[in-house]
Image (spheres, coloured by chain):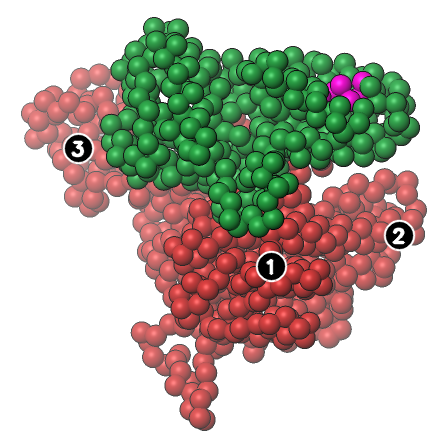
Chain colours: A red, B green
Amino acid sequence: MYHRYVVVALSRRKPNEGKELTKEEKQRLRKQKKHQKKQKERKNEKGPSETEKDKTPVSLLPPPQPVATQKAPSALPAPASAPIPVPASAPFHSSPAPSPADKPAKSKAELKAERRARQETDRAAKQPGSSSSGIKTKVPLSELNPVVKRLPEHVQVDDPAVVKRLAKKLERQQIPLRSDYGYKVSLFSHLHQYSRKAPLTQLLSIPSTVIHPSIVRLGLQYSQGIVAGSNARSVALLHAFKQVIRDYTTPPNEELSRDLVNKLKPYISFLNQCRPLSASMGNAIKYIKKEISNIPSQCKEEEAKTKLLTCIDRYIEEKIVLAAKAISKYAIEKISDGDVILVYGYSSLVNNILCEAFEKSRKFRVIVVDSRPRLEGREALRRLVQRGISCTYVLISALSYILPEVSKVFLGAHALLANGYVMSRVGTSQIALVARTYNVPVLVCCETYKFCERVQTDSFVSNELDDPDDLMVTRKGKTQLENWQDVSSLGLLNLVYDVTPPDFVDLVITDLGMIPCTSVPVVLRVKNLDQ
Amino acid sequence: MDKDELVEYFRTQVRQDPEVPSAVAAIRTLLEFLKRDQTGETILGLRENLTQTIRRLEEADSSVAVSSGGELFLRFISLTSLEHPDLSQCKKVMVERGELFLKKISLSRSKVAKLCHTFIKDGAKILTHSSSRVVLKVLESAAADKKRFTVYVTESQPDSAGRQMADKLQNLNIPVTVVLDAAVGYIMEKVDLVIVGAEGVVESGGIINKIGTYQLAVCSKAHNKPFYVVAESFKFVRLYPLNQQDVPERFKYKADTLKAVEDLAEEHPMIDYTPPSLITLLFTDLGVLTPSAVSDELIKLYL
């Protein structure tokens, strides 16, 4: 039960602590184990041994003589002290007995840290090669230990043990490790921060025998931001996988269903290194892996390949294209004549809805809100104006100024979490908050394939840090932040996502219909039943 | 069975038994139509006819309950039609199940009353709005449980339905006071809890009820008094209003007004929408639900 809390607390610790405590921890561990052994032996003895229990937390390696000398003065206060039976379980309580000279009374945090270190050593011993990264794996241990849910490695960057494990895994898969860039703000030091000028592909050897060229191209497109937006990324991923499947040949003495899945693992690690996978991509990959493993072994290779290709095509068709049509149908009911609709950034789904509504001759106008450094709203503005929709363009700082005019807010989502929180482009939660204070209804449009089982209540625990150099702006030939790396107290933070609580969202439009934000776990449950 | 016969049948149902919920009367009418219908050749044709019938009934009585009852019946039909592709057999099964369904929902009001009356403590002061038969049933069972409480009823203009409620409560020997609609804020500090009925429960967990309910809800939230809604499950409707304006026009006004008047902007709406954030609990025959659980139940009923 303690493990889960321990692992969460880890991600918030300062980076220095990990190194300082390791040696001390190991010492304490050894001492602890000896305590417990001694206590178990001495439990049967009574009388003077009770006082020893008080003292055993203090010393152990030194032979019993110094303990005997200490016993005498403590013989008087010892019988008086009530917690004599308590020290039997001393490791879990800070001992009220005279505190040992060389160590402070054990606090709960230190005890947890010891337990965690024990866990890490156990884990490292057990698994020389870990399973696929990025996806939480449930490790079913015996009934004595509770189920341990491991954190994905991309939120544990400040933990050197995890980083080492990842490096070993990537080495095995022959994929270069991308190094972090620049000073990271301490609150987000548990996340990766890469520079766009150092793409992973530079470190690859040519020709790369491990990674398929379409995957290399895809990775480069992701890291340079050429393919952006969750739908676009998922579709590009699925197309690249289709190419991989087309070029795949089963090696002799291998089964397609198992070998292909193993072939995909290094690709996924590579793409993860180029840019952390989104929730929609995660769900798509889960689906493909399931389909591949469900291929019967008697199936001929050509047949299996065509089957997989049709599966992928159908997935794209159903979950993305048709879902968009269904969502537009529901959303158009909510758009009435004379509406002033506010949109933020560029969401392919919301754009689709607005264009369809305009085609159905609804009279409305749009306000596009944009923010630096991505300025994605300009793309949305361009597309809407091309259709002939009357638009206004503002930056997010003018939000409270234009909100009194707005009748509805339409937002896209990157993912919908299991507790009803909406994960979307940074700035979305701000828009939802201000819209709530003005009593403007907020509608989130999201396909069901973006629903994920994760639970998050704040934007710190799991996020993505973009290239900090993007925040530099050159005006009139001068770049103020040019030498930001030289200033030791300066950090640049370029967040990509934030989470919006369900109280700020009035309605979620999905391909299954219109649901309140709190019903996301119901949909997940229904989906799991279908599968 | 043509249009007028249908409407006549529906009106007779309501007249004969004033206690019957309008949704139940609508479902009975539809079942009768199903029994007498000879023109349907295919299931799709049958569905078409039923949809048209429902629309005609809505013209006769524009309340949300009729719409929800009709949709529920239609949903229930579609599920049956999936199991039995043969039309005549399908019809027989439908009629049987329809009767069973009617029997079940006639008991729903007592189920609701049983759940809710335990929330009324001895010496409680209750505020209610307009005339609701479900609320009456709840108060009846609480009185039968030997609980002592007083009731304040809002007058609920323009039809003074609150006075009828007050008369009915007096017949049950419950001390009752009629207050003005405008006196809701004044009386709120005296009351312990607010119980209202609902004409329709929407997907978000909010309710559609007689005009004045929203005010009542806002006042009770401001005074931190619990706001309870009692409604049977056949009142769950597949609407999702975002605000007052988003409620479709066909529910806001009485059926006669819709037909007679040209410019609806001049008319006073008869219902309003109360958002789920103002509702504490909903008592239904499916159990005691929080507003967010309503969507869960709806998904189970309709998906």
Q: Picture coordinates of residue A413 (x, y %)?
A: 57, 56
Q: In this view, does A68 lie above or below B112?
A: below
Q: Picture coordinates of residue A251 (x, y %)?
A: 85, 53
Q: Which of marks 2 and 3 is nearer the N terminus?
A: 3
Element type at mark 3: loop
Whether the magenta-drawn stretch holds residue B30 is answered as: yes
Residue A153 visible in the snapshot:
no
> Residue at image x 81%, y 34%?
B48
Res. B100 image quadrant: top right
Q: Which residue is nearer to you in this view: B37 or A456?
A: B37
Dots 2 and 1 on the same chain: yes
Mark 1, Cα crowd under 10 Å, few <14 / some 14-19 / many 20+, is: few
Give the chain of mark 2. Answer: A
Residue bearing the label numbered 2 = A306
The kind of residue tagged 1 is Asp
Mark number displayed over residue A96: 3
Q: Which of marks 2 and 1 is nearer the N terminus?
A: 2
Tally of numbered discs:
3
Q: Which residue is nearer to you in this view: A408 or B265?
A: B265
